[in-house]
Amino acid sequence: MIGLLAFCAAAAVATAAPRKSTKIVPREALPALIPAPQRVEVTGPYRMPLLNVKVRIDSTLDLPAEGYVLETYKKGVRITARDEQGAVWARQTLRQLADARGLVPSVRIVDWPAFGWRGFMHDTGRNFIPVDTLKRHLDLLSRYKINLFHWHLTDYPAWRIESRAFPRLNDPVYQRPGRDVGKFYTYGEIRDVIAYARRRGIRVVPEIDMPGHSAYFNSAFGFGMADPRGMRVLERALNEFFEEIPVEDAPWVHIGSDEVHIPNPTEFMRWADSVVRAAGRVPMVWDPGLTPASTGTIRQVWSEAPGYVADQTAGRGPFVDSYMGYLNNYDPISFTPRMLLHAPCGRAQGDSVALGGILCLWNDTKAPDQLGIVRNSSLWSGLLPFIERLWHGGAVPEGAPVNPNLFPDPDSPAGEALTEFEGRMEAHKRGILAGEPFCWWPNAGLRWRVSEPVALGADTTGVKWHTLYGGAVDVDAMLVTLGLARPDSAEVWAETIITVPGDTVLWAQVGFEAPSRSNRISNGIGRQGEWETGSDLWVNGVRVAPPVWREPGAYAFRFNTWARPEEELPYTSEQLFWTRQPVKIALKAGSNRILLRSRKLFPAQHWIFAFIPHE
């Protein structure tokens, strides 16, 4: 059991063949749909077999693009969709409505998305992802009405696109050793992935990152992309791509342009814009990044700086929201409410300027394996609340924390919305996503008393205490919210009460750091017999021992590991509290006091504590 929990995977759920029967179903027993439809009406007390599905496209349907009406009857199912895309989503809703026997309830659903762009980005430039794996992910993305796959095809280690004009772009000699050298996608494979995605309602946005994120290019040619010679190479390579990938398959092309300093930024961006537009495509760029050449360029905003969107996007053309956060930069426990309680583009619904959002998974560090990419950043516990917010839209519920890295009060409207969504998300973890790495457990109802910081080893006499919520408490966010200084080193104490009806044993994910899967800054695994950072945990006054570490004291990097040898060390399961083995927690009947001490040891440490009990 512990081994399975360590890899965050549940057993697959077996399903029986549909039976031709009808059962009465209570109104409250509707399936846990994600994303929740805009309108659902229970039209009868029955469940019936999923038979005789009729689909009709009606472009005059009074619904936004991708909208549909789904009605179930004793004799069948009727779908009326605004467009083909809407028909795909109606069928996906129908799949979620069906129970294990293939029976669906009597309902009438009227549904449409609040935002037109609902995307997910995979970085295959740093860690190559095989086509079969991409297709498996596309299948699941479609189940949740994601309609855009942002395919990051190039980055520092390699150019992952077949190049006939310049074979050296695919030559392992010029790529980062150990990063899937020599692996790339043929044009046939790229067209195949695009067609596969289209059949599932997903458009592909390929990204060829330039002129930065391109160490392989400098290595292959001896000059950079912004050099006049580099621009000539790029123009031939881009035009080859455009000839092989028709405009209808890739109407938008992302050209990167971030995190780079070049002597000719205006010239380069005008040139890149002209090449893309000459091929009939609309360019996309990162923002912040080099200034786009025209206001028609779509900007993908990634800065999380307060007020950046309001200050920088007004009158600058269409944009998509990626500033809600990157999957690899947060722990998956606090990332769920961060996504669910975020207003995409700062709005309740999208328009021609605020297009929507793209959730990004950057694979900066070397991946241990393909499952590790998804497991270490817990893709699904971020993507499900992301699509819930992007599809359903609407105002953020009252009571959402000012700091998005904190949990809401469970008794507030925001807290109630989070708790309700957690119930649906757990059902999907056990159902559609059973067997997928899914490192998350319901935790919104936990309440903590947390002390203000004290010096390491000091007592808490006279120190103020505050109430915080959730299974992972971001101490840094707490201090910012309270207007308190963030010390270089300190500790806080926290306690919560867990009440159970009888003596029982639970398992718990416990942790005291949340290292980014990007820069790897961390104090590393604890010494043998100690929790990481020397923190500690007690249940009813009895110390809870940490796991027996396989690599005690390893992976302590108090510096940014980008472009350093340490970046080539894959994360192991015990480095992250959500992937490591849980600890056994014995509780007695009645109230149980959970007490912990969380320590910060150096300025750049991401200071959190986590305690998530589960079965």
Image (cartoon, rainbow, N blue to C red):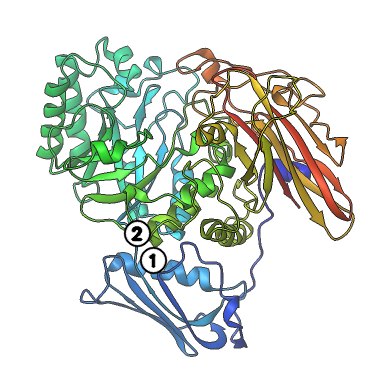
Amino acid type at image mark 1 = Trp
Tag on residue 89? 1
Q: Is mark 2 on a helix, strand or loop?
A: loop
Identify the residue position indicated by label 2 in the image. 201
Determine the residue positioned at 24% across, 56% down.
351
Tag on residue 369? none
Q: Earlier in the sequence, mark 1 or mark 2?
A: 1
Q: Residue 340's spot in the image, x, y percent?
A: 48, 52
Determine the residue positioned at 51% across, 66% down.
33
Contact (CB < 8 A) between labels 1 and 2?
yes
Q: Residue 410's spot in the image, x, y percent?
A: 60, 55
Q: Residue 333's spot in the image, x, y percent?
A: 59, 44
Front residue (pair 465, 111): 465
Q: In which quarter of the image is residue 221?
A: top left
Q: Distance between the residues labelled 1 and 2?
A: 8 Å
Amino acid type at image mark 2 = Gly
Front residue (pair 274, 545): 545
Give left or right: position of 351 versus 614: left
